[in-house]
Image: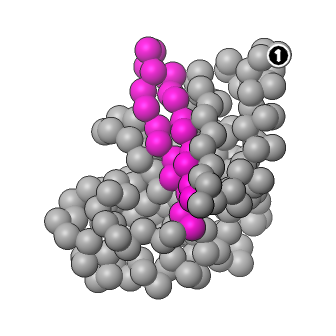
Amino acid sequence: MSATRLTLTLASEAMTRALADRLADRLGPGDTLLLDGPIGAGKTAFARALIQAAQARAGRDPEDVPSPTFTLVQTYEAGEFEIWHADLYRLGHPQEVMELGLDEAFDTALCLIEWPDRLGDLAPPGALRLALAPGGTETLRHASFTAAGTVWADRLSPILTELQTETQTGTAPDA
């Protein structure tokens, strides 16, 4: 089976928020976004921007979105569906995912999962992985999307093309 791999350099926090905002248009119930990267890579900041963009699109006032490091899971309403934001860093075994109810949320909600390696074999096969890596400056990030198959390529290509074009023409947010 072929895989999708798309990469983008995010020169600023505003570009990271712009990517999250555009991605919020493409995600919905049953989608899982696996947010990968070291501490400080911007996983929570990206999730926060995506959740707030989805809420705004649903006509809701964007909520404060704290890191779920200590609560493990935070849920948010985004119109017709819920968003589950999970930080699995403190989990010791994939079976603990079942106790959180994530296995059911994978089917009914949009799930944003930080530290997805803690899922083990429980990661949904159709999940999209976003690896964030710090760049050479405090705000520079490298974003790499990977997924099995090519379904995600069709959903992501327009977003990445827009952002790459904006970066090249100097119209990207805070580029």
- Residue 67 seen: yes
| In the image, residue 50 above or below residue 38 | below
Compared across the picture, whether 63 is left or right of 159 comes to left
Residue 53 placement (x, y as % from top left)? 67, 53
Quick one: quadrant of the N terminus? bottom right
| Magenta segment | 126-148
Q: Main secondary structure of the magenta part?
A: strand
Taking depth in this image into account, of 148 and 25 the one nearest to the observer is: 148
Taking depth in this image into account, of 39 and 143 the one nearest to the observer is: 143
Residue 47 placement (x, y as % from top left)? 52, 51
> What residue is shown at x 49% (from left), y 79% (from top)?
105
Compared across the picture, whether 145 is left or right of 117 comes to right
Taking depth in this image into account, of 71 and 160 the one nearest to the observer is: 160
Dot 1 falls on a residue whose secondary structure is helix
Quick one: quadrant of the C terminus? top right
Badge 1 is on which residue?
Answer: 169
| In the image, residue 9 above or below residue 27 | above
